Amino acid sequence: MKVAIWGAGGIGCYYGVKLLNAGHQVTFIARSEHLEAMQTKGLRLQHSSINFQGPVNALSQAEWSDKYQCNDFDLIILCLKSTATAAVIDEMASWLKQGSCPILSLQNGVDNEAQIAAVIGQKRTLGGLAVRIGGHITQPGTVEADGIAQIIFGQWPNTQKQTDTALLNTLYEMFNAANIDIQVSDDIRRELWRKLLINNGVNPLSALTELNTRQITSEPHLGRTVYKMMEEAAQAASYDNVTLTKVDVDEMFTLISNFNAIKTSMLVDLEKGRPLEQDAISGAVIERCLKLKTPATTTELIDTLLRIKCDKLARC
């Protein structure tokens, strides 16, 4: 199959290389020094399951849209930061509307799919999440990834809407044959909210404290803060008609507490001076809880302290 990785950072490069090694035609869309390195020196990926170094088809977004049509691809996997979703989807709207290629979002947050569907429709929109994976660009052209690296995906927002079963089956087989741990969900919106339990619990707090996930979950006071922020995310989910219980919170807290000690994506962005995904993570929780008239006080506190920190650093 012909696959485009739109946003070939740490996560995108990992899944792109797995598909490339399985014989698929993969185009990596990136930018800046990372793109230049991939174009001139190739891509290097290190993971316990794979060590790859070789040339790849890497393009800028402008080069991609000039060289190809949307229907030249069987699947577009969107791995951009959620802070960029609305802008790039709008920028590429005409190009995307000319074709029928589906887009699979593998991004943080619970709002990306709605933004994508607003442009290309729900039928072409697949929600997804990359779980139990940490992946970062360590230097231009080099990516290090860690974890089981699963994908959970499904029709947006769930299978109660029109579902292309043949497409889901085809993509399942593609990922499975590439040795990617893959699951199809009939309620992907709920799965995205379950992941947001973890993201809201550890991402803002890790960026604020500059500690990894193991450090903040194992320290008693910080661990209780993580759990409380997860509870507030579960509360926020009800605004989207998603029910998450204490069982979900406990499961996600246990998962992240026992996972490898990793730097969260928000902490890495802070260190690299990039915009943080606060609006997509803690902001999404705060906004919905306010609408429910049940404020997420702990999330609000950590979010505010982190924004103050960023303002002082003048780099977020």
Image: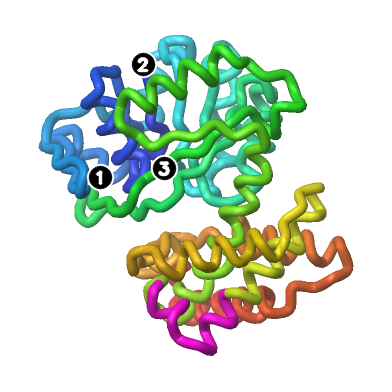
Q: Name the residue under label 3.
A: 150
Mark 1 lies on a secondary structure that is helix
Mark 3 packing: few (<14 Cα in 10 Å), some, or many (20+)?
some
Q: What residue type is labelled 3?
A: Gln
Q: Is residue 221 magenta?
A: yes
The image quarter in which residue 92 lies: top right
Give the x, y percent position of residue 309: 50, 80
Give yes or no for contact between labels 3 and 2 (Cβ–Cβ under 8 Å): no
Q: Nearer the viewer, mark 2 or mark 1?
A: 2
In the displayed structure, would residue 153 be above or below residue 69?
A: below
Q: Give the extent of the magenta segment.
A: 214-226
Please give the name of the residue rendered at 30% of the width and 40% of the height, measured from the top-left corner. Answer: 14
Amino acid of disc 2: Lys
Crowding at dot 1, Cα within 10 Å, few <14 / some 14-19 / many 20+, comes out as many
Q: From this view, report whether residue 239 is shown above or below residue 69.
A: below
Which x, y percent locates residue 205?
A: 51, 75
**Label 3 vs label 2: CA separation?**
21 Å
